[in-house]
Image: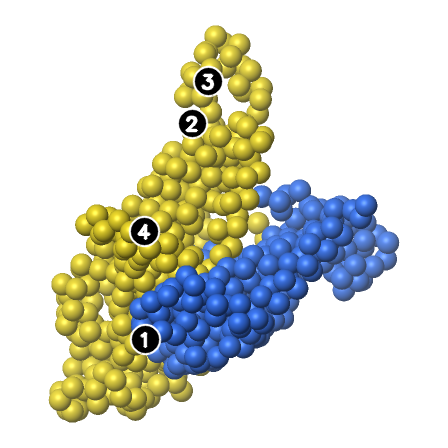
Chain colours: A blue, B yellow
Amino acid sequence: MPDRQTRRWIILALASAAFIALIASTGVWEASLRFLFPQESQVLHPRASLLTLVVEHLGLVGISSSLTILIGVPLGIWVTCPGGRNFLPIVTDLTSFGQTFPPVAVLALAVPMLGFGLVPTVVALFLYGLLPVVRNTIAGLRAVPPHLLDAAYGMGMGRFQALFRVEIPLAARVILAGIRISVIINIGTAMIGAAIGAGGLGSPIIAGLVQDNLAYIIEGAVPAAILAVLADQLLANVEGSFAYMPEEATR
Amino acid sequence: MMVRQWVTGNSVAVTGSCLGLLSLPFGWLTLKASRLTAGTSLRLWDAFSWGVAAAIIVLWLLCLALSLAERDKRHAITIGITANAILILTFIFAGPAANRLTATGAEFARVSLSAGVWVTVAAVYMLVFAARQSLPDYRVWQNLISWTGLAAVVILLFTGWLNNISVVQEFLGRESRFQQELVKHIFLFGGSVIAGTIIGIPLGIWAARNRRAERPIFYFANITQTIPSLALFGLLIAPLSALSFAFPVLREFGIRGVGAAPALIALIIYSLLPIVRNTFVGLRQLDPAVIDAGLGMGMSRPQVFRRLEVPLAAPLVLEGVRTASVQAVGLTAVAALIGAGGLGWFVFQGLGQAAPDLIILGAIPIIVLALFVDAVMRTIVRVSTPKGLATGTS
């Protein structure tokens, strides 16, 4: 019998395979949506196939979340280092203040500044996604017990060695939890990005709402819901693989 | 607390001052022939007069010099005052500049604030924050520095000084609609949070008391929280419209596929998780010794619940309500897409018409409402925290 963690990975792999098979089989969708909504003349959003929409959505979230991680984690590390310590209060203040902002409002404000389309959506998703990543990076690093750091320095580690071999591994789980929150928020906000022309799974829903076509709405909503749950599970599994969890950071 | 490195001055304030100087080459105002056309952007010296531009530049340089040299509280206070002065100057001169430009421009000409002003606002925020940090023991100065500029801008807005700025024009053209949607927004998010609280607290208590209930409750709450809001709204539309077709009576109660009904249901579902989780944690974290002590003093089980568990868990529960409320303000904005109305209506109308001012007219009040709700709920949490716990939570 494989252990709990391996079992989770196997279940996730099977579920993802089933999901891919489901979104790739256009015939099944068409038949079942026709059965559910006999009154609609067209049941599949004509702009793009479901698979394309899912790929678009993942691309949108992938680009913005990668940017978020590439910039957010180093930023969080920097403000906890002696060099950036002066900026710690303002960054902490900004991340808690910024999280009060509704993601829709951030997305909406990107339009007057950057216009319609992919770019404003990616920028808004990236900026909003930064908040949980930076906050958790700071929380994770600060929760590393000082005596462990002393021990690391005592063993003759330099600052970088201590950072990469002690602090980051110990904070990894909390940082990953922040990334998970950020990605899930991004998946949800990217749906609304369809309203500003970014494509993705939101576009059949918006088209369905505008044209009063229930089948389009379901075509977008069901895969989006499954996608979000799968992504959440994936990140939960990654998080679970890093066993050490400093107690102060569990909340 | 951290130790400041006074040798190099105040690095946050230095960054803020540099950001402020960086705002100068940007466009400060944008002149558009109508609300939908692209505009020409005006530099600081074209938008305002040369004198004003020079004054702003001098003030920024003063800030930079002061922050490089910052040694004591007088420097910090001067930085704070200068930053506020820059903010106030910008908005005081933006009003007449807009009046002049709209009067000389085309009939439907509009003037909007652009990047330079927003960068200035961000820079002022950094300076104010830095100044506050340097004055930990001067509450009066802290508050003066934090709120004077903001209060001045709000006063300018309400006295009509900024009436020719495009967003304000947009608002003046739709004042009654705005009030109507604002009220609708408050009802939608307030109603759903209240309903979520009424359902969530008993669920949390149940989960805390019963280990078998714990898993399914959290499983459901976690999964629904993960689902994108637009998808959940979408998933609720189909069953509700089927229901209203099957039982036309329901339509009289406003239950249709689109509109307020699916919005309310989804918003209630979303507000459950924070409330259930915090109720659960609030009850579970209690020291069993406290309850034993209560029982030992001769309290009955209901008395222990009412006089010990409720007051001790209350701050955490309210903290959950706060999270749920702030989240609900934003999600209600999305609900405008499914015809539920609220401030999101302006956002999505604006997106549909490609009218930036209309988008901003929706987005900024949504943010302000979220900040306001957050502040109110934080105060409630603080007030409700029993004295003995005051340092432990919040």
Of B371 and A146, the residue lying toward us? B371
How far, Cα to Cα, is label 4 from label 2?
42 Å
| Residue where numbered disc 2 is placed | B311
Amino acid type, residue under disc 1 in the picture:
Leu
Dot 3 lies on which element? helix
Q: Is residue B220 rendered to the left or right of residue A172?
A: left
Q: Residue at x 48, y 8 (%)?
A: B298
Give the image location of residue B95, x and y in percent. Answer: 20, 77
Give the image location of residue B244, x and y in percent. Answer: 28, 53
Residue B87, above or below B143: below
Mark 3–mark 4 CB contact (< 8 Å): no
| Residue where numbered disc 4 is placed | B243
Q: How many marks?
A: 4
Question: Mark 2 or mark 3, which has the lower sequence index?
Answer: 3
Q: Residue at x 80, y 48 (%)?
A: A2
Amino acid type, residue under disc 4 in the picture:
Leu
Question: Mark 4 or mark 2, which has the lower sequence index?
Answer: 4
How far, Cα to Cα, is label 1 from label 3?
54 Å
Marks 4 and 1 on same chain: yes
Amino acid type, residue under disc 2 in the picture:
Pro
Amino acid type, residue under disc 3 in the picture:
Val
Marks 4 and 2 on same chain: yes
Q: Which mark is on residue B304?
A: 3
Q: Is residue B144 rendered to the left or right of residue B289?
A: left
